[in-house]
Image: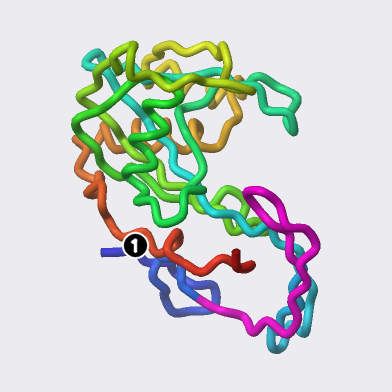
């Protein structure tokens, strides 16, 4: 059951995002990349007129809040070139394997980035990272019942992931760091605050690991 919004001027509305497709009058492919593309659309906003919007066409991603038996969260530190920072993050990765199930992608990323597997999975929260300019949705999972992946089965990391630090931090400490402005990655920010809120409610807000995710099941703006 959704919450209700008291509209200015009278009436109410459900506090739930709505699907709405503005007519696309023109679409130009500006750049085709290995993972994402850049398109420029002319859309019809009715009374708002016709406007051009540049959009990053993104496959989506998953992220994982992994909690151990002491309620500590697994974190990694990774260099992010656009930010010119080493950011503390939670394990995450792109949905760039065609047809891959989101939960399977989350299991894979947790193993590849942190050498950890989990027995218990739930959906914690869904979000868009930058809906004003990108199609990227992210699903954040809560993973518990953790265990180390055997050394012989571990993924060989490279590039920015090579040698990255990993460790454990309490949820309350992570939330405090977010509110101080010490950490900035969107997945850890949203994931931690959602986990704190859900835990305070006895985890009643958790959804099944295979809960519908219509934001991810869509056609890419650019085929191929």
As drawn, 151 above or below 179: above
State the residue at coordinates (62%, 80%).
22
Q: Nearer the viewer, residue 44 or 162?
A: 162
The C terminus, quarter of image = bottom right
Residue 178: x %, y % from top left: 53, 25
2 sits to left or right of 165: left
Q: How many marks?
A: 1
Q: What element carries label 1?
A: loop
Residue 114 found in image quarter:
top left
As drawn, 214 above or below 52: above
Say if the magenta span includes residue 37: yes
Residue 204 found in image quarter:
top left
Q: Which of 54 and 172 is in front in this view?
A: 54
Q: Is the magenta stretch mostly helix, strand or loop?
A: strand
Name the colour scheme: rainbow
Q: What stretch is highlighted in magenta?
A: 20-39
Q: Nearer the viewer, residue 99 or 142?
A: 99
State the residue at coordinates (20%, 33%).
120
């Amino acid at each position: 059951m959704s919450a209700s919004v008291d509209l200015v001027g009278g009436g109410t509305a459900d506090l739930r995002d709505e699907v709405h497709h503005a007519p696309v009058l023109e679409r130009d492919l500006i750049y085709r990349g290995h993972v994402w593309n850049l398109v420029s659309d002319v859309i019809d906003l009715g009374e708002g007129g016709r406007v051009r919007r540049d959009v990053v066409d993104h496959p989506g991603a998953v992220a994982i809040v992994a909690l151990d038996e002491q309620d500590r969260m697994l974190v990694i530190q990774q260099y992010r070139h656009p930010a010119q920072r080493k950011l503390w993050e939670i394990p995450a990765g792109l949905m760039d394997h065609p047809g891959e199930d989101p939960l399977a992608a989350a299991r894979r990323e947790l193993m590849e980035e942190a050498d950890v597997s989990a027995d218990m999975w739930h959906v914690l929260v869904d979000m868009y990272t930058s809906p004003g300019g990108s199609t990227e949705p992210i699903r954040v999972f809560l993973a518990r019942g953790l265990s180390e992946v055997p050394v012989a089965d571990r993924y060989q990391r490279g590039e920015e992931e090579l040698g990255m630090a990993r460790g454990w931090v309490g949820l309350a400490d992570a939330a405090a760091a977010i509110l101080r402005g010490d950490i900035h990655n969107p997945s850890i920010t949203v994931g931690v605050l959602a986990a704190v809120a859900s835990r305070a409610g006895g985890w009643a807000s958790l959804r099944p690991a295979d809960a519908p995710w219509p934001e991810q099941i869509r056609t890419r703006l650019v085929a191929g």
